[in-house]
Image (cartoon, rainbow, N blue to C red):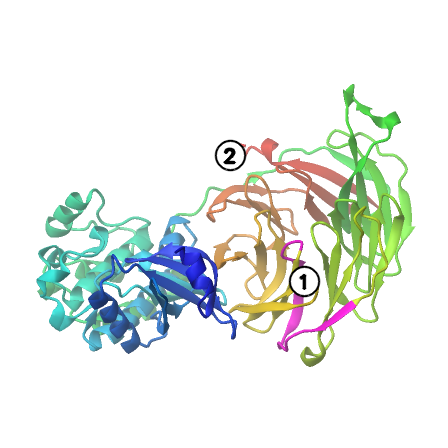
Amino acid sequence: MAISRRLRRSHYRLLGLVGHGQFGRVYCAIHRQTGDLVALKDLNRDRFSTHKFLRELRFLLSLEHPNIATCQALEHSATGRQLVLDYCEGGTLRALIEHEVPLSLAEVLGFVSDILRALDQAHRQGIVHCDIKPENILLSIVPGGWQVKISDFGIARLSLEASEAELGNTGSPAYMAPERFYNQHPAASDLYAVGVILYELLTGQRPFSGTPTELMVAHLNQRAILPEHLPVPLNEILRKALQKLLAKRYKTAAEMLAAVETVAHQLPQEQLASSVRQPLEPPMSAPALTFVTLPYPVEVVGWVNVPLTRTHQTVQGQEVTQGTLLVTGCQRRVWVYHWTGQGQERIGQPQGLTLPWPIRQFQAVPYGGCLFTDYSIHMLSMKQGVVAIARFDHPVKAALTPDGRWFAACNVESPPSERQLLLRRLTGPDHRLESLPLTRVSMPVAEGQVVALSALDTRHFLVAIAQAATTTFQCFTRRGTAVGTLSLYTALQALVPAAKPYRFLALEQHFPNVVLVIDFKPFRVSRYRLDIQPHWLIDTGAGYAAISLDGKLRLISEEGQVIGQIDRLPRPADVLPLSATQLLWAVSEGAYSRIYTVDLKTLGLDIIF
């Protein structure tokens, strides 16, 4: 029987596979009644004997610490067992290392200190983890950073059981202390592994590499080469943690923790705040860009594709079936231009219209485009012109589904106990706008301010409500049924859909140089740091473009690496994607404006498109 069918019959609804543990797969799941998010560790009965299973459960139930992923419950089914564990949406320390996320020295010391606090708790209870490595260090998102939790005590054992021959050689050779290769498992072997992790966090590489046999020889016989650029007290910690002989190593996690905390207090703040990785190459300056001058100012820009009439079926000798309308807005005025793209030297006379309130946003839909103000929503339809589809007495956040058939709105000034979600179907089968009743749905009470409302897909909407240090996500169907609630322990200020389904890019309120990548199915969050303060986040074919108000662009790969840096671009009033590698870049020049087409292929980036 498939695991997905088995999990659907349990108390938990499966959201997706998030990893593999020592003896089984790990899933993100949500409790059907409470909505709590958990990790389900599926334990393969053939690979995990009843003795091992009971021992893991015994250890997990006896360990309770903020830096240990605790066991909440046990799930049984006819063909398997699952441990219900704390869920950590931030991934693993391994991903953080591989993605080369810039970490300060203070953060590195904080990670190691938290790991040592957890090990101190376990060692005091006679439990040795025996497989400390970055893959088993889970991360939860907290404001501005991460909280670590040690997971996978699947091969931990009581100190008194450490000599049992049946346990054999288990663990990861890259992080194994010398005595581990002789089937000895003292608590100090965990501290040796912590020393390897500290070395890797500080330098980006482990002290030894190679095949399992080569690693064993190195751990037994070779001294680790300590980096010369590190402060002397840090090298002393590495030297002692990586000693071959137990007698020369730290005796307890508390002793090593005290040494780390002493260094953290002694080093200057400037050194603690500095990055442990080498800085990136200096940004490149933007090349000269062509532009089109528009006769009116711009604050919001958008575009829609429209079918061409027979008299407009050739452009530069080539037959085309679609054209582009450029939509710009400033305050209450909106202008619509015919747009032929990059290289356009002049632009025709626009068509203008006036909205009852200043335009805030434009969203293209298959049959036209939607104009959002704080108090109304207007549809620009190729068949019906501009039609007001909703008006409100109070300012709202609003969004359309990608197919343009449904919209949702939420009053941003309502008290939490009176907050409602407003929903309406917009079009019939032929995309003709229909005047259908407005559905009002009471929302679960959640303190804070509504900071974003977006469509998850064509059937679901997502509302983000932020407090000082928490963001609550509430999901609803387009009919108004509440699906569930998730929490993220940091306050967001913006949420932008990405190209991948159920993925969003986000900005934090109190950490302006941070970009979050949030997946909702399953729930996972990655945090990336930049040297700029992004205002626009755009998913391009080459990566995520983060753009600042002063015209700086950073291109981030899906793994979180900065793969492109461009400075001295025109200061934008608005930016939106035109194609997979092109950005429409609007610049306001007082009474008029300029529209640039920024092509990532022509910026000199070291990227293969």
**Magenta stretch, residue numbers:** 439-458
Residue 189 in the image, given as x and y percentages of width and height: 17, 63
Circle 1 sits in a helix, a strand or a loop, which is it? strand
Q: Is residue 166 visible?
A: yes
Circle 2 sits in a helix, a strand or a loop, which is it? loop
Q: Quadrant of residue 18?
A: bottom left
Pointers 2 and 1 in contact (CB under 8 A)? no
Foreground residue among 510 and 567: 510
Q: Amino acid at mark 1?
A: Leu
**Is 488 rendered above or below residue 342?**
below
User: Looking at the rendering, in which quadrant would you find the C terminus?
Assistant: top right
Residue 20 in the image, given as x and y percentages of width and height: 35, 55
Label whose residue precedes the other's in the sequence (2 or 1)? 1
Q: Quadrant of residue 113?
A: bottom left
**6 drawn magenta:** no
Residue bearing mark 2:
607
**Is 74 rendered above or below residue 283?**
below
Dot 1: within a 10 Å radius of its alpha carbon, few (fewer than 14), some, or many (20 or more) residues?
many
**450 drawn magenta:** yes
